[in-house]
Image: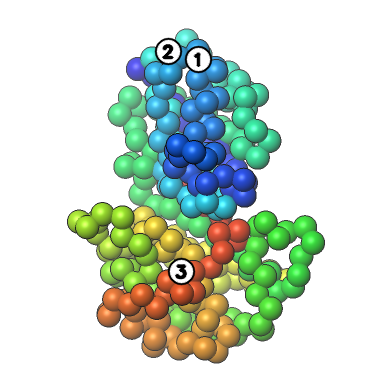
Amino acid sequence: MTRFKLTLEYDGTRYAGWQLQKNDRSIQGELLQAAFKVFGTQQVEVYGAGRTDAGVHARGQVAHLAVDDSRITPEQLRMRMNDELSHDINILSVEKAHPKFHARHDAKNRSYVYQISKRRDAFGKKYVWWVRDTLDIAAMRAAAGRLVGFHDFRSFGDVEKEDQSTLVDLTRLDIREDADRIYIHISGSHFLWKMVRRIAGVLVEVGRGRMSADTVEGFLKNPSREPAKFTAPPSGLFLERVEY
């Protein structure tokens, strides 16, 4: 069995997320279909480093592809897979991987960016969240600082399994302003389902003056469903990078 490491980018607008779906299109499903055509076999597996939600994008998603065929070179695989994929999914690079390499289990750190637009944007609607209110960036940065570190982020995510750990090491949470855009950069060991979007939404509430940094920090100490009400739209979220 030959295993390849794929780095890819995609526009998630038309897809129901990364995860394979029975009745809807997914990024994983599209990659599997392309691989079936390239190799002429159903004996292919594809796993990603992160299961992005419906409508979420990626600039640096990583996946592994395992197939019982060692004759194809990494560059041949990249070119042939891209020929089969839709225009909104693009494999950037392919390399041979260790037979036991796993895109999700071996990942050490994941980085996302959430993009907010300060104005109505005729071209970027699919890739930003337009927030009409003027945001207090300093207040948002102060609240963001309270979240950095190793904490229980139960309040910010949906737990898929009863025994799932909600402890996450958040290594970076920066907010950058550039002309009409606000960028929330976030990195961590891993992320709970919807966690990044809820952090972005809560920080926007702080920026609007409707929530304090103390309240945000309180969500770490006392589990609450409050952040779920402020879940940011998927359009502004990009998986930027996966580190191993």
Q: Earlier in the sequence, mark 2 or mark 1?
A: 1
User: Of the residues shown, which amino acid type is indicated by label 2?
Assistant: Asp
Helix, strand or loop for disc 1: helix
User: Of the residues shown, which amino acid type is indicated by label 3?
Assistant: Arg
Residue at point 76% right, 70% down? Answer: 120
Residue at point 33% right, 41% down? Answer: 106
Q: Earlier in the sequence, mark 3 or mark 2?
A: 2
User: Of the residues shown, which amino acid type is indicated by label 1?
Assistant: Phe
Residue at point 46% right, 63% down? Answer: 196
User: What number is the disc on residue 39?
Assistant: 1
- Expressed as whole percent of the image width and height from the top left, the position of residue 149 reads 34, 69
**Horizontally, is 123 left or right of 229 in the view?**
right
Residue at point 52% right, 51% down? Answer: 54
State the colouring used for the structure image: rainbow
Q: Answer yes or no: do the residues labelled 3 and 1 have beta carbons within 8 Å?
A: no
Front residue (pair 186, 235) = 235
**Residue 148: in sight, yes or no?**
no
Query: Which is in the foreground here, disc 2 or disc 1?
Result: 1
Residue 121: image quadrant is bottom right
Disc 2 marks which residue?
69
Q: Quadrant of the N terminus?
A: top left
**Residue 164: in sight, yes or no?**
yes
Disc 3 marks which residue?
198
Position of residue 108 relative to residue 177, above or below, is above
User: What number is the disc on residue 186?
Assistant: none
Query: Which is in the foreground here, disc 3 or disc 2?
Result: 3
Q: Answer yes or no: do the residues labelled 2 and 1 have beta carbons within 8 Å?
A: yes
Farthest-out residue, front: 23
